[in-house]
Amino acid sequence: MSTINPSGWRPTTPSQGGESAEGTFTGNRALMLEEALIFEIGSADTTGVDFGEAPAGKSRLAGMERSKAIGLPGLSEPETVRHYTRLSRQNYAIDLGLFPLGSCTMKHNPRLNERMARLPGFADIHPLQPVDTVQGALEAIDQLAHWLITLTGMQAVAMSPKAGAHGELCGVLAIRAALDAKGETARRIMLVPESAHGTNPATAAFAGFAVEDIPATPEGRVDVAALKARLGPDIAGVMITNPNTCGLFEPDLKDISDAVHAAGGYVYCDGANFNAIVGRVRPGDLGVDAMHINLHKTFSTPHGGGGPGSGPVVLSAALAPYAPLPFVEKTADGYRLVEEENAEEHHAGTFGRMTAFHGQMGMFTRALTYILSHGADGLRQVAEDSVLNANYVLRSMEDVLDAPFAKSGPCMHEAIFSDKGLAEGFSTLDIAKGLIDESYHPMTVYFPLVVHGAMLVEPTETESKAALDQFIGAFRSVAARARNGEPALKSAPHFAPRRRLDETLAARKPVLAYKDAAPAEAAE
Ligand SMILES: *Cc1c(COP(=O)(O)O)cnc(C)c1O
């Protein structure tokens, strides 16, 4: 770490920026500001507020009160605003450009969503408010539930899970409750394809199941014969992503579901990739028993786009009785929340509760706004355009990057490439880092594991052809540099606020607390 002069400015060192930043007194590159840590520029006796001393009173903390100053660095109000605004400018956001992260569906977040989410009747309410004062909010939850059930062709929906992985847990706990209710406690193995998102096996294990892998075919789909061969009295069910993480539709899902049901198991579908099929395919028609929907993917507001996650889980008739509480119920006198207290009366099979209250109200409002403003035809077009855009990227890249499944036909909403054919010593990581210099957040890398050095690109439907062409131009240029073994690419990024970091060291030995003299190995 470089030295700090008393005014807080630090002189530039080559490690902090690209060559072009050398020579500026502040370390800045044009209007991109090099910002020190708040621990380096703040001080314990600076503050942006001016409160008088608290009146002396008798402490009620029984000796637990703080005995010395807390020592947090402070800044004045304008300095605070600038510090965090400068830091925020070193980040990438969907509002800045195309965000090709595969499996994440980083689409534009329509501003109408934000307008609706900020209406006081949605934004300024409290979960413990009397229900007769929040009838409109409950109606919005009920309407969204209706559309999610309609779009998926399922029987019921649990709205409370707060993200995709949380929804997986909800669905798998419902499967466990259904098995337990039938006395089938010997069914404790969950089958998960090799190409699954890491959250699937983690969820199954967390819910008390042993996980067994199902292999993929050379075409990147579930090996149906291997799956069927493994079915039996110890199998609780399968967790299948459709479209899968290779960006391909699983055409045999109905056949798989029938076989799993005949063998006494349940079918969990990871619905994170629903964007590719929304308005086109109803998972209920494919025999799915439970599926989470990432509202923050398919129904806009991606990570960093304005809201938190939300992962409602649609359920089949077989699993609906085990859904978690609370839920909204429409009665003759309006909407009510069915809470734990009436569990006996209303919902005897419930496995319990996923979260304290009824879920992410802000995300419900955004998703409902998105669904109502698109309409049935608009949602169908979302799926079609997202698939079209991904295929445009796939076909525009396949002469410079290996596309392992391109021969088996078009992809769904994401295009997958491998590191085959790169120059000796060059890897997927080099392409990802090179894209940062081109001002793009890298695509998803090294996932799914079934493709060597995988690069998974999901452009989404919200990118125009001009935006796609610009990205493809940058991606092609970086890929060509990796094929030709251009030495400078090995040390990219050159123009980012930080150069290539030792990510393994950062993950293995994270330095989570600021120390004045950082140990040499933890320094950048
Ligand atoms: C995003 C994703 C998840 C997890 O969703 P979170 O909301 O991040 O918890 C699970 N499976 C797949 C295939 C995903 O893309």
Image (cartoon, rainbow, N blue to C red):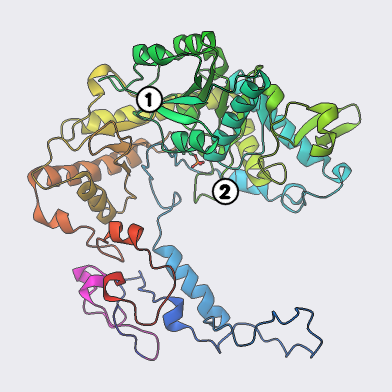
Decide if residue 282 is in sight here. Answer: no
Q: Quadrant of residue 34?
A: bottom left
Q: Residue beneath label 2, please?
A: 308
| Relative side of 373 to 499, left or right | right
Is ligand 1 less than 8 Å from the beta carbon at label 2?
no
| Dot placed on the residue nearer the N-terminal end, 2 or 1 | 2
Q: Is mark 1 within 8 Å of ligand 1?
A: no
Q: Which residues are magenta?
A: 6-26
Q: Indicate whether residue 11 is drawn in magenta.
A: yes
Q: From the top left corner, tell me how far across and down residue 381 is, in percent.
A: 49, 25
Q: Amino acid at mark 1?
A: Met
Residue occupying the point 35% across, 28% down: 194
Q: Position of residue 83 (x, y in %)?
A: 47, 74
Q: Residues within 10 Å of mark 1 (few under 14, many from 20)?
A: many
Mark 2, residues whose alpha carbon is within 10 Å: few (<14), some, or many (≥20)?
Answer: some
Q: Mark 2 is on which residue type?
A: Pro
- Magenta span: helix, strand or loop, mainly? loop
Where 279 sits versus 116, above or below? above
The answer to whether residue 77 shows anywhere in this view is yes
Residue 227: image location, x then y, percent: 39, 16
Instruction: Determine whether 279 is above or below 17 in the image.
Output: above
